[in-house]
Image (cartoon, helix red, strand yellow):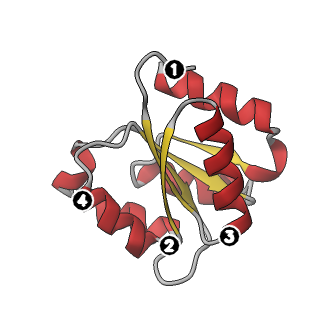
Amino acid sequence: MPDIQKLILIVDDDDYNLDFYQELLQDAGYKVDTAPNGSEGMKKLDEIAHYDLILLDIVMPVKDGMETLKALQGNPVRAKHGPIFMLSALGQDSVLDNAKALGCNGYIVKTDITPEDLLAKVKEILQ
């Protein structure tokens, strides 16, 4: 259980993934907000004073992860939040390089990670 309850925002259009990640992280002691697309995620980022971590899917309708990163680039809202890690089923280096160029701190390939690995990664990021 984390000493201080960290707040995480998960932005993903897949309801199953949102529910799964939210439950997994909440069971580990984290507070979790969710958004189904980048537009809704941006609203949450505007409303909340500080997220300790943002997990952002790349492929989504309305506003995808890359568009969301572009919108956050140079935006004062970005400065008040913790690191952004892309959540993606894509492991393509060019996509991930573009995400890093737009301010992403790292990525997690959904298909390559177990629930235990995800928890360990989140703990590592938040330390």
Camera-side mark, 2 or 4: 4
**Which tag, 2 or 1, sits closer to the chain's start?**
1
Callout 1, which amino acid?
Pro
Q: Which residue is mark 3?
A: 14
Q: Are marks 2 and 4 in contact (CB under 8 Å)?
A: no
* Left or right side of 19 for 5: left
Q: Which mark is residue 2?
A: 1
Q: Is 50 on the left or on the right of 37, as rendered?
A: left
Gap between marks 2 and 1, in whole Å? 28 Å
Q: CA distance from mark 1 to mark 3?
A: 27 Å
Check disc 2 and give the amino acid type: Asn
Query: Between 75 and 97, which is closer to the camera in this rendering?
Result: 75
In the picture, the disc for residue 47 is 4
* N-terminal label among 2 and 4: 2
Q: Nearer the viewer, mark 2 or mark 1?
A: 1
Q: Is residue 102 above or below residue 118?
A: below
Residue 118 to residue 125: above or below: below
Label 1 residue SS: loop
Query: Which residue is denoted by mark 2 in the rendering?
Result: 37
Residue at the spot x=66%, y=47% of the render? 23
User: In the rendered view, would you say 39 is above or below 22?
Assistant: below
Q: Position of residue 47 (x, y in %)?
A: 24, 59
Between disc 2 and disc 3, whose residue precedes?
3
* Front disc: 1 or 3: 1
Q: Residues within 10 Å of mark 1 (few under 14, many from 20)?
A: few
- The mark nearer the N terminus, 3 or 4, is 3
Q: Residues within 10 Å of mark 2 (few under 14, many from 20)?
A: many
Considering every residue shown, the one lying at the far bottom of the view is 62
- Callout 3: few (<14), some (14-19), or many (20+) C-alpha neighbours within 10 Å? some
Q: Earlier in the sequence, mark 4 or mark 1?
A: 1
